[in-house]
Amino acid sequence: MKHNITRRDFLNGSLLALGSFALPPISLSETLSPLKGNKIYPPGLTGMRGNRSKAIETAHKFGFERGNDWSKPPFAKEQDYDLIVVGGGISGLAAARFFQLQHGLDKRILILEEHDDFGGHARRNEFEVNSQTRVNYGGSQSMDSPNEYSKETLSLLDDLGVNLKLFDQAYDQSFFRKNDLRPVTYFNKSVFGQDKVVDYTFANMSSSMPGMPNAKLDLINAVKQMPLSKQTKQQLLRVYKESKSALDNVAYFGRFEYIEKTPYFDFLKQKHNVIDPQVLNLLRGFTVDDWGVGTDVLSVLEAVASGAPGANIQEIPFYGKYIKEYMSDDGEPYIHHFPDGNATIARALVAKMIPAVSNVCDIEKIVKAKFNYQQLDREGAKVKLRLNSTVLNVNPIKNGHQQTGVEVTYIQQGIAHRVRGKSCVLACYNMMIPHLVPQLPKRQKKALKKNIKIPVIYTSVMLNNWQSLYDGHIGAAHSPGNMHQTMLMDFPVSIGDYHSSAKPEQPQALTMIHTPLSEEFGIPPIEQFKQGQDRIMTTSFETIEQEIKEHLSGMLSPSGFDPERDINAITVNRWTHGFTYGGADLFDPDMEENAELGRQSFGRITIANSDSGASAFMDSAIDQAWRAVREIEFR
């Protein structure tokens, strides 16, 4: 059972710590590269970001062709460390900081990160518009329900100077209402026969966009405006109108078991006689923001608790109180969001451990601070963060039967190196760990390989202004016929000297989210993830760019939008291996037990990352980092 699924996984600031997926040095040929002098500044890169095709090709060349024979590479110049961390996402960075705090600031730590930027999915997208610096998040969005965080996570946030009460004022909860910006549904011409914006959404967006007013139309009047057939409209309305009586003919004491074990789509066909594929498609996709999959593979309980219509499950005998708690929010407004999402947390961790990268450590000022990436891997520093470094092997060093340390082999700029450490935290994509440490027990490797991540694309679209959104009264949109199912205006957050866009003539970032679903209904989630990974990896930036222009033009052109004039830049954060999959009632219900088995320490090698907690929330990634560092003490 999941608890509190109202803002689950990738819309709640939880895409985290991919770390060192076995990929090669990043090629910049797929990006547009702003230079600071002659130095590339990763947050400012636009075009295709995240996992890229050339990286995969090089991984095959260096990894799979040569297998695990990495005994001959030379040692790096400074080869011995107290701790080596594989993966520079939030979990890896937190592990390094916890190690410092527990063992001393004099300890030598090396963090190896395969990407050209740190933070994992806590990715900062930075733009220069009319001499103004504007930022957006490329994945990890916000701190969800921080008052429920563990004492370990709260202590780390306190160490970084994060004051949660700051957001009570920093987040302008009146912004959307005073500008009359509402959630809508956009039906596009290619799928529905005409471009149509309807002031209604099937999904409740107000919980994830605090302060956003409800749509103007009620369901009946909204359906009248939708470009759907008469039959489709009738079936759609029937699902809503018959919700109270849908379970009447289910045995009184068997209703809870029914909603927990019955697929939602089977329920729609059995209890509402829904057979129209367009109705099913409309009621399928809006849960991807919560689950990474559609309602076709969710139970009735999971789907309805996420906002799907069709059943009044809160009145089920004996389980009503439990279900209400299951469906309820925690009462905390979803306002704990830095302008670049959780990239600020990652940047604060780096600045704390490697002060030379920035002369700013204040959490309110770090949003606008420019980091000197040349200082991340500075000779003589106690903590080094080595980017573009793809780890391919982590080999235990033994003295007899006792493990005394580790040797880590990685590739940087096409050259293999080795380093030694007393201990190692693998804060990387857990499915790759069996390839990095082939000596692990078979049962553990099997568990780790099951940690398939959910693919997702987070696209940042920087607009020169948001006049067309203002004129169209659009603050967020669900788009069932488009690649990007979700469109969100940036959160109205002002911190320190950074101010959100307050007027329609000012620059504004949009976040557009795509989670690939299978063409057929009912395909098991893990199989869908594999299919989706292949699809988004083979989709070019040019294809995505064109889709975005057509999407926004169809939705906003009645309000005067011109993509060639109004779009300043596009950054596509393509996460082929996106966020942690926690399982579902009907498929893979054992993911928590699987994660517990997979994260077992192996001598002086311990395992972190959100995967090892079977939860994509940011605090899970930090909690797993704390556990992994604590386990080192007992080796």
Image (tube, helix red, strand yellow):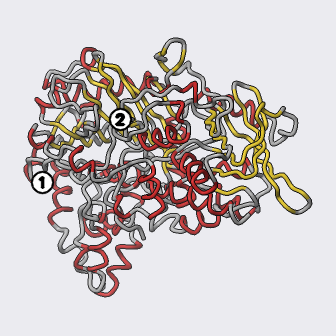
Looking at this view, is 235 or 412 the one in front?
Answer: 412
Q: From the image, which quarter does the C terminus lie in?
A: bottom right
Q: Give coordinates of residue 330: x percent, y percent.
A: 28, 65
Number of callouts: 2
User: Is 540 in front, or is 522?
Assistant: 540
Residue 244: quarter of image: bottom left
From mark 1 to mark 2, how far is it between C-alphas? 45 Å
Q: Residue at x 57, y 24 (%)?
A: 374
The amino acid type of the residue labelled 2 equals: Lys
> What numbered label is drawn on residue 514?
none
Q: Quadrant of residue 103?
A: bottom right
* Residue 601 appearing in the image: yes
Identify the element where label 1 is drawn: helix
Identity of the residue furthest to the right in this view: 400
Q: Which mark is residue 365?
A: 2
**Marker disc for residue 219:** 1
User: Which residue shows up at 56% across the image and 59% down it?
Assistant: 626
Q: Reply above or below: 318 against 371.
A: below
Tell me the element at label 2. Answer: loop
